[in-house]
Structure formats: C-alpha cells, structure tokens
Image: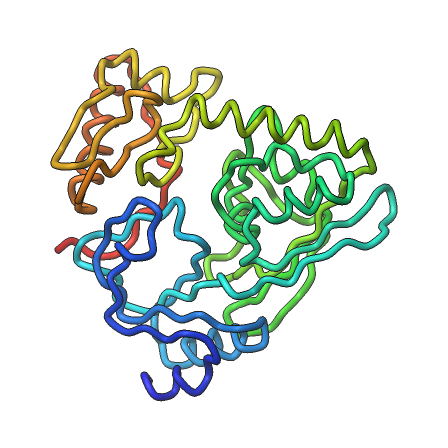
Amino acid sequence: MKEKLKELVSGEVLFDEPMSRHTSIGAGGKADALLFPGNREELARIIACLREAGTAYMPVGNCTNLIVRDGGFRGVLISLRDLREKGIRSGEGGVCLYAEAGVPLSEIVHLSVEESLTGMEFCAGIPGTVGGGVRMNAGAYGREMKDIVKGITLINGTGRARSVDREKLRFAYRNLDLPEDTVVVRAEFLLQKGSKDQVRSKVNEIVAMRKAKHPLQYRSAGSVFKNPGTVPAGRLIEEAGLKGSRIGDAVVSEEHGNFIVNAGTARAGDIIALIERVEKQVFLKRGIRLEREVKIIGEEE
C-alpha cells in the first residue's frame, strides 16, 4: 500500500508523521500516513484506492480545528492543502468567486477586496481553508458560509465528483450535513459588487476585533466549543471561573474563555483533559452541556 500511495500522489507522502508538526495547536500523535495530492484527479484516485483496500481515511485542511490523540491516527489523512485553484466569473444575481478546498480563507478574502466584492468580509481572520470552512459552516459576526455559498463540488467514496447547488445543501449551525465519506473539493460563493474602500475597511475592522479578543500569540485550535443558544460559550466558561485553568501546558486563555492554548509543549491528552474539565464544570454550574467545535480523532496513547 505504501508503494501504491507513492505512485498515486505527486505531492508529499509522509508515513508515521507526527501531527504535532501540522496541527495549529502544535500537539498530536502520529498518523500512519499523511498525503498531499496535487489536484482533484489524484484525490479521486486516492479515495477510490483506499476504499477498495478498506483503509480508513479522512480529509484535512490546515488542521486548524483538529486535535489528534497522542496514540495517533490509524489510517490515512489526506491534506487538501495543494488544491489551490481560485478565480471569479460573472454569475446570475452577482459575481461568483470560486475556490478549491485548499485555498486559505484569507486568500479569498483578499481576492474579494481586490475585486471590490462584498459578502466575504466575515471570513477575515478565520485561519481555515475553503473546504473546512464550508464543511463546518464557518461563521462570525452574524454571518455564515450558508449565506454566500452558491454551490459546491464533492467527491464521494468511490472517487466520483458531482456538483450540488445551494438549494440542495443542508446547513446547520457549524455544520454541513454530508455523508461521512464525502469530500468538499470546490466551492462557489455569490458576492456583490461594492466599494473597494468600504470592503477593505470592514475587513480591517474585523481583523482588529479578532486581534483584540483572541489569544493569537499562542498556538490554539480556535474556538473549542459551539455557542449554546444566545449565551456565548466563552462567557459561560469565564463565569465558571475557568479562565487560566491549566493541565500541563494546556491553558484556558485569559483573553477568551473559549480558547485553549498551547503555552509550551502541551500534549493532546492534556488539551483533551482540559476540554473535559471545562465541560464538566460548566454543566455543574449552569446545567448546560457544551458541544465541541474542535474535531478530536485518533487513539489514546
């Protein structure tokens, strides 16, 4: 299988790869394999091969909301990092900005500013990629991906690609309901022509707010929990007296309660144990069960 994967992939192929080198929080055990396909055709062939062999796999982007347990991931992680095609075209009802799954959200925000397109500003400062952003219906400041997605392209477990219009997509809070073996490989966003100065000003305003509120000087996986109803998770965590709570080098941020940061050499086990402590304490004090926004995969050490 190792030799077969090397044949199928033009990009990097890494075996027994420590995911601490790739996750934004800087922790995690080894993946059996980490692949970087160079295009959608390679990705389709890889998925078909792995499925036929019965090998577990999972697509990943920038690994910004991912925690891999210290025992590692038994299977293949497929990075969509090198799927980077993007551009704009005219569309009915506005202008279509299209991008493949590996394009960082920061790049399409920059492109929308340069092209004087409004609608994408809320993505400013979100560290993920297009694929992950669409899959988790990323959002901020009252807007979500579902508000601008025109359609997406998917590859299913057999390696077949198909396009799906917005009307047939089932978005929910921080989620797009898709079959587990389906990979988002491309998305189209419907934006409107606006004033470049106004779009740039709004982007700068949102970036400044993020810098003021978020602990960007530390490694983290972003927001750990979804906001339950009208009360932000960060406020619940702060009210529970958990800011500054620590296990090893995993720390609940003093700046924003919904961030757990790696203050040094935190292990995934420390981070997960701290997540569980926060969940328990918030439930005991407020009777609210926090739902995780971060994705935790792999095996215990």
Give coordinates of residue 263: x percent, y percent: 21, 36
Q: Quadrant of the C terminus?
A: bottom left
Q: Residue at x 39, y 52 (%)?
A: 63
Which one is in front, 107 or 169? 107
State whether residue 163 is above or below residue 292. Answer: below
Q: Residue at x 52, y 36 (%)?
A: 125
State whether residue 176 is above or below residue 250. Answer: below
Q: Which quadrant of the figure has residue 255?
A: top left
Q: Residue at x 34, y 27 (%)?
A: 290
Q: Residue at x 80, y 38 (%)?
A: 192
Q: Which quadrant of the figure has residue 231?
A: top left
Which one is in front, 4 or 289? 4
Give coordinates of residue 295: x percent, y percent: 36, 46
Give coordinates of residue 257: x percent, y percent: 32, 22
14 left or right, relative to 88: left
State whether residue 14 is above or below residue 110. Answer: below
Q: How many marks?
A: 0
Q: Quadrant of the N terminus?
A: bottom left
Which one is in front, 187 or 260? 260
State whether residue 287 is above or below residue 146. Answer: above
Q: Which quadrant of the figure has residue 58?
A: bottom left
64 left or right, relative to 119: left
Colouring scheme, one of rainbow, by chain, secondary structure, one colour: rainbow
Give coordinates of residue 42: x percent, y percent: 53, 77
256 left or right, relative to 109: left
